[in-house]
Amino acid sequence: MDVLESMKREMIRRRLSHRTIMTYLFYVQKFLKFCNKQPKEFSKKDCREFIVKYSDVDCCGKTLNVVLNSLRFMMEEILRKSMRLNIRYSKTPKSLPECLTREESKALINAINNPKHNLLVSLMYGAGLRVSELVKLKPQDIEIQSGIGWVRHGKGDKDRPFILPIKTVARHPKCA
């Protein structure tokens, strides 16, 4: 049984994101090299030793959680083995990102002389768009009259609305 191929097929069938698929396969491949056994012989002990090895490598809590989830997926969903390790997920620090002040944001936007670039940065800042969402925007995704726009195939391949900032629309009358 090819564990990696079986995992890939099952994750594609479940429509997991490409990045999740690649990450899970990466860690399971490392586990297969570490364990050096046939899939039928894998045990909880092997998984626990692999996770302990990874926690010694000075990786962060989020990485350990991904390693644990990828092994759990392989064991439970592909090999149909119990994976109750009684390992708690690692705590991840919940710190807020450092942001620009309102004055710094205004100064940054006002320093942009190109009208198109100014509109893009204003829209990204005012509507809270990711860069990848902004560059995929099309004119038909923006409804000026109703004051909303649509992110198509955003994070997680989901569509979502966003509110057009009134100041941005007022500052850029050509876009209306």
Image (cartoon, rainbow, N blue to C red):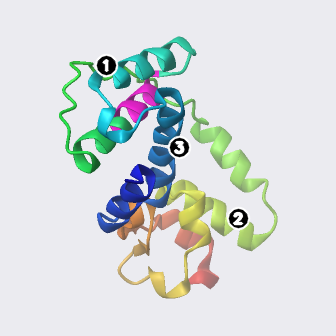
Q: Are marks 3 and 1 in contact (CB under 8 Å)?
A: no
In magenta, the rendered stretch is: 61-69
| Magenta stretch, overall SS | helix
Q: Residue furthest right?
A: 113
Q: Which residue is mark 3?
A: 26
Q: Amino acid at mark 2?
A: Asn
Query: Residue at the spot x=48%, y=36% of the render?
Result: 32
Tell me residue 85's x, y (percent). 23, 22
Pointers 2 and 3 in contact (C-beta within 8 Å): no
Q: Amino acid at mark 1?
A: Lys
Q: Name the foreground residue: 150 vs 54.
A: 54
Residue wearing tag 2: 118
**Mark before the other along the chain sequence, 3 or 1:** 3
Give residue 70's position: percent from left, percent from top. Answer: 38, 40
Q: Is residue 94 above or below residue 19?
A: above
Neighbourhood count class around disc 3 (C-alpha, 10 Å): few under 14, some 14–19, many 20 upward: some
Decide: is 62 above or below 91.
Answer: below
Q: Is residue 67 magenta?
A: yes
Which residue is more in the foreground, 102 or 148? 148
- Residue 144 x %, y %: 45, 81
Residue 113 visible in rendering: yes
